[in-house]
Each structure stands twice: as structure tokens, then as C-alpha cells.
Amino acid sequence: MAEPAVRVTPYWELTFDADGDPDSGKRDRLLAGVAQHHVRDLIVFAHGWNNDRSVATRLYDRFFAPMPQLAPAAKIGCVGVVWPSMRFSDEPIPDFPRAVAAELPRRPALDKDTRHALLETFPGRATVIDQLARLLDQQPREEAELEEFGRLVRMLVDVVPPGPQVLFAADTLAEGVPQNSPDMLSGSVAAVCEEFAQALTHLEAPDGAASFSLPNPWEGAHELLRQATYYAMKRRAGTVGERGLGRVVGQLAARAPQVRVHLVGHSFGARLVSFALRGLPEGVRTVKSVTLLQGAFSHYAFASRLPHDARAGGVLEGQHNRIDGPLVCCHSRHDSALSTMYPLASRMAGDARGVAALDAGRMLGAKWGAMGHGGVQAVPGTRSFELADALKAKMPASGCVNIDAAAVVRRGGPPAGAHSDIVHRELAQVVLAAGRIK
């Protein structure tokens, strides 16, 4: 298949399957091409909540577009990572054509594009997906039907309670503490759906205008399906990063050690490129920067100890030290997918006390927060900047750097908010500054 149209050159597409195995032809073209084009700096971008290759390609085309002008003397090569993820079609992407990210009918009905995405992402589950769609369409009043919906979600994403935790790829690990089946999928489904419905009501009417109406639990059921699917993608992102991208970067280092690699990831793609650090062969020091854009994983992932639990540390503890340069985390308070839904779902996944205490959007963010909402936490020496100041200052040469990008990452409606509002010249500048690319 021909490479998709991306305006920057040279450009390569690097494709992985769900197990992290690369398309060998595309990998080999990349490995050979960097030498042929005398590439000095290779920028590798991993998308997040997209399963449509055309959507991912359009993102790469637009994000990379200003770089030749911003760094005219640099010998840059660009790589777009394509991996089997998915985005619910009712999450509009700012500035994308309606044909790509349409405003679709209100939840909880499951639109045909999302059904197709689920079928592509979870092959062999067509009957389960059809049953989920039927329940969301009919919205039966019986609580037993909500419980049945939860059972079907577990079947879709391969969680069978009360067995070991196989869905939730934890970002923090406790010493000697077993990982139990996530409460979100093993407790009362009706209670979880009600909690999600309340959160959605708050996001859509933050001023309290809708406070006298009862949330529809089937809207919460739709959100349960979304969050369960995203946690499956979270697990997959780690697999693709560690077993796939990390190894390819190692192969590139062996073949072209002079090439400076810069990893960039959006949403779960940020988790993917972070786990690529764990997959690097021993001694490889060619990764010169990592930039996380609205990262959808725990802000404690790189911590050695958690402030609320001295037994636990981040799953990527110390991995930022494998970068021969900085780990830069861009975050925004306008990202409601990460400021509200992510901590709520994370708490449901890991808090045995239940899901009762939704607090008007604050959502226990200190304990369950995401990189893309508040930046890297509990890593000594982390520096913090406003976006404008970061673009004026010289980027730190190493360690973790938080950049508040709310000045540009600010557009988007519920439930995701500004989560996908990342195509900005200023963020392209951040990537170049992090890698000292001029």
C-alpha cells in the first residue's frame, strides 16, 4: 500500500498490530530511508484515540506541517505510528472536517461508525457488540438489564471476574499488593452507570442548570463502554510501545547510531512512546527527547514512590533517565476527558471502597490524575513552565518538564473537552525545543 499523503518529507509510516509486531516492510523502509535521506533528527509521533488510519494521517500531516519553516536548516525525518486503537465517533476533533469527526446524535445510542470501530478493534466479538448496541438503543428500565450490559462489556474486553486483573494496565504498582479485578467491571454496574451519568451531566451543565433532572443511567452505560474500551487501549498502548516501538528504535540505533530520535505521543500514544523507553535495548542512548501531549496515563507513572502510598511506585519508575534529553509533558485544565472522566474511571478501577463521592468535577485528581491534566508528579527536580515562557526559555537538558498548554489546548465539547485540540504551531515548537532541533 502506498504511503498516505503527508506534506512533510521525508515521511514514513510505521504500523504495529495489537501484539506490538511491526509491518516488516514499512519498518525496513524506515531503517533504510533515514540513511538515504541523511536524516539527523527523526521525530516519531504516536496517535491516541484513533483507529482510522486516515484520521491519524491527517493529524500527522497537520502537526508536522510547520516544522520545516520552524527549523529550516535541520535535517528532519518524520514518522507516523499507526496502531490498532479507536475513538468513539461522538468525540469531535477541533478543526477536522465533519466527514472525519462529525457531531453525531446524542448518547446513549451507538452510532454505526462507533460500531464499526468496535468490530475492527475487537475482532470476533460481533454478537457481543450487537447486543450492547441493542441495549443502548432500547434503554430498558430494569436494573438487571444494566447488569447484563456490564457482563457484555466484560466479555468484549476480556475481563472475567473474579479472576486476575487482565484489562487494567496499572500505571502504579504496589509492592506485595495483588491487582484485583477492577471495581468498574466487577461491582454494581447500575451504581457505576449512575456515577458516570452524574459526571456527564456536570460536564454538559457545569453551572448546575441541569441539577434538577435525573441523569439517565444508560448515558452512564455508554460511558462505561467507552472507558472500558479505552482501558483496553491503554493496555495495548503499553504493549505496542514496549514490544514494538522500543525494539524498532533499538534496531535503528544499531543501524544508524548518528540519528537523534524524538518521541511524541498524544493521549494513549503518550503512554505508548513512554513504554517504548522500557523496551529499548540496554545501552541505547539515541532517544534525545520525549514530548507527551495530553497524556492519558497516571501522573505518577515515573515516580519512585507515591505520596499517598509509600509501598507503591510508578510502572515507569526511572525510565525518563533513559532519555538523553528531557521528558516534556504538555497539559491543559480544559481537557475534561482527563480532568473528570479519567480520574473517575481510575478510581473505579482501583478503589475497593466503591465509587460514591463525585465532587463537582474535582474527582480526587491528586490521587488519580492524568499526565495531560496536571503534568508529571512526584518526580524530584521536575521543572514547570507556562507555554509562552517555555517557548522563550531554553528547555532543560534533562529531567522532567511540565508545560501548561491551556493557552492553546482549550477547544472541544463534552465529554472529551480539549483532549484532541493539539494541532498548534506552538506545540510543534515545543517538540523542536525539547529536542534542540534548529
Image (cartoon, rainbow, N blue to C red):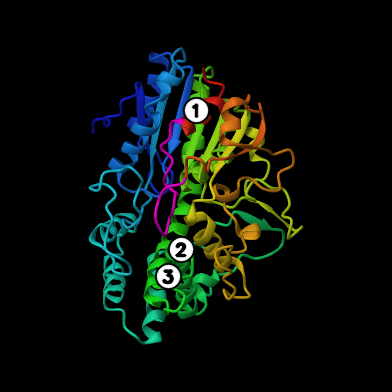
Local secondary structure at mark 3: helix
Front residue (pair 144, 7): 7
In this image, 40 relative to 13: left or right?
Answer: right
Give the residue number, with chain letter if any, for mark 3: 154
Q: Which mark is residue 429?
A: 1
Q: Residues within 10 Å of mark 1 (few under 14, many from 20)?
A: some
Q: Distance between the residues labelled 1 and 3?
A: 42 Å
Residue 101 image position (x, y, % from top left): 29, 49
Q: Distance between the residues labelled 1 and 2?
A: 31 Å
- What residue type is disc 2 on? Leu
Q: Distance between the residues labelled 3 and 2?
A: 26 Å
Quadrant assignment, res 216: bottom left
On whether residue 150 falls in the magenta region, the answer is no
From what the image shows, is residue 181 above or below residue 229? below
Q: Are marks 1 and 3 in contact (CB under 8 Å)?
A: no
Local secondary structure at mark 1: helix
Front residue (pair 39, 333): 333
Give the residue number, with chain letter if any, for mark 2: 203
Quadrant showing the N terminus: top left
Q: What stretch is highlighted in magenta?
A: 410-425
- What residue type is disc 3 on? Arg
Residue 165 can be seen, yes or no? no
Task: Look at the magenta stretch and give its main secondary structure.
Answer: loop
Front residue (pair 372, 189): 372
